Amino acid sequence: MTRAPNWNAASEISLITSLNDARPEAERLTRDQMLAQLMDDLAGKTPQENRSINENWLHWAREEQRPPPGDWLTWLFLGGRGAGKTRAGAEWLRAQVQAGAARVALIGPAFADVREVMLSGPSGLLNIGPQETRPKFEASRRRVVWPSGAVGYAFSSEDPDGLRGPQFEAAWADEFAAWKKPQETLDTLRFGLRLGARPRLMVTTTPRPIAALKALIAAPGVAITRASTEANAQYLAPGFIKALRAQYGASRLARQELDGILIEDPDDALWTRSMIDAALGLDAIEVERVVVAVDPPASATGDECGIIAAGSAGRGRFKRAVVLGDHALRARPERWARAVSEAVIVHGADHVVAEANQGGDMVRAVLQAAAPELTVKLVHASRGKRARAEPIAALYAAGRVGHALRMPALEDQMCAFGSEGETGSPDRVDALVWALAALFGKEAEPRMRRL
């Protein structure tokens, strides 16, 4: 293989990939064979050359992972799951520190996300770059400190006020579309970006059509790059993308989660993003009654088990409810039953409401085997899912249902529910409908029939 004078690892990967794509399908190399060919080429270089190439991010980065040209204030990287957003964000922030930034900020959906993904993850700041230049994590102070003395402070979107007071030269905001209070947190952060000659912000996220992301895209001084999951396929587990494509095809969910495309609300969906944003903005209520609703899966290893906790306060037309948590999971019966029991304890629920269409006696037995003290009330779905959900959506529209926190998986399912592009079983929405129907009673037509 002939190398150009300005050879680097990125050009080598590009050349190997293009040559592979040009071969007949039956003769194409596997991912492991392509990596082996690259390693053979690297074997001819000195250890110092190999180390330099391995540690120089710009040798390996794809075009969309590199800082865009121009005099931008905010770089917004929209990408599918596994598209390399985290690595791009971590490398950009590392480069800011190398260039002299002494105070930087890291903001994630929650502190756990900052710690486990932005810092400690395989592409996080603690695991990239030369070993001698990597920062140390001071968990008690929620910060990282570089050998140069630069400091990175961790913040959560759950606490926008935590960003009041501190000031920074650069900031990296990860999974912005999953933030609990995206607009408020972003606004507060911007006021703190006031140090240095040119303070800048990088935002990495899988897009979801929330108002704050739409506003960011339209804002002046924002440069945008985009990447699909396929673009980073060589660093993902073999078969990962193929399996997801086979399951989700060209659905709205696939276009959003794999292609990184911002998908607007479908015309025929019962809930919209603006309705959910409004629900998040409602004042908190002191709940008087709490239930946990369960939509059990049809099989032991199939769909998710929908588990939603919700509470209510007030009477009659003054009654309001708040969705307290989404605890859905895909697991065997004994595990999801334990998750229901844990949700009851966490939220102090009065009882469990469980759909009985998939075998009521079995559902009751599984739940009470996990926690004999559980009070389980079985309900039967005598009408279709959309008919049951319509009055619940109407309660949202009337401003009578709030959300205590951002629940991305539930929100995505709500905004696709009932639309032509909906895929999969809406287990979370079913559990949500049962929970709110139990709390609102006669107002939640059609009525539930208890067994």
Image (cartoon, helix red, strand yellow):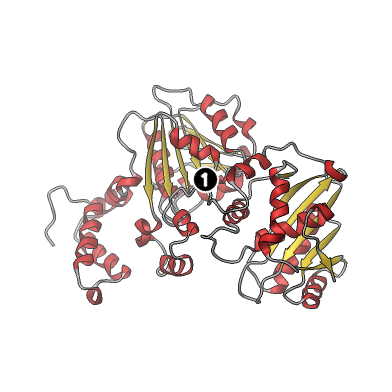
Question: Is residue 300 something that shows in the picture?
Answer: yes
* Residue 17 point in image, percent of width and height: 24, 62
Looking at the rendered structure, the secondary structure element under dot 1 is loop
Q: Amino acid at mark 1?
A: Pro
Residue 332, picture quadrant = bottom right
Q: Residue at x 36, y 32 (%)?
A: 99
Q: Residue at x 47, y 35 (%)?
A: 216
| 43 in relation to 70, above or below | below
Q: Residues within 10 Å of mark 1 (few under 14, many from 20)?
A: some
Tell which of 237 and 257 is nearer to you. 257
Q: Residue at x 53, y 26 (%)?
A: 192
| 160 in relation to 445, above or below | above
Q: Which residue position is annotated with label 1?
A: 209
Which quadrant does the C terminus fall into? bottom right
Question: Is residue 119 something that shows in the picture?
Answer: no
* Residue 363 point in image, percent of width and height: 77, 73
Tell which of 279 and 233 is nearer to you. 279
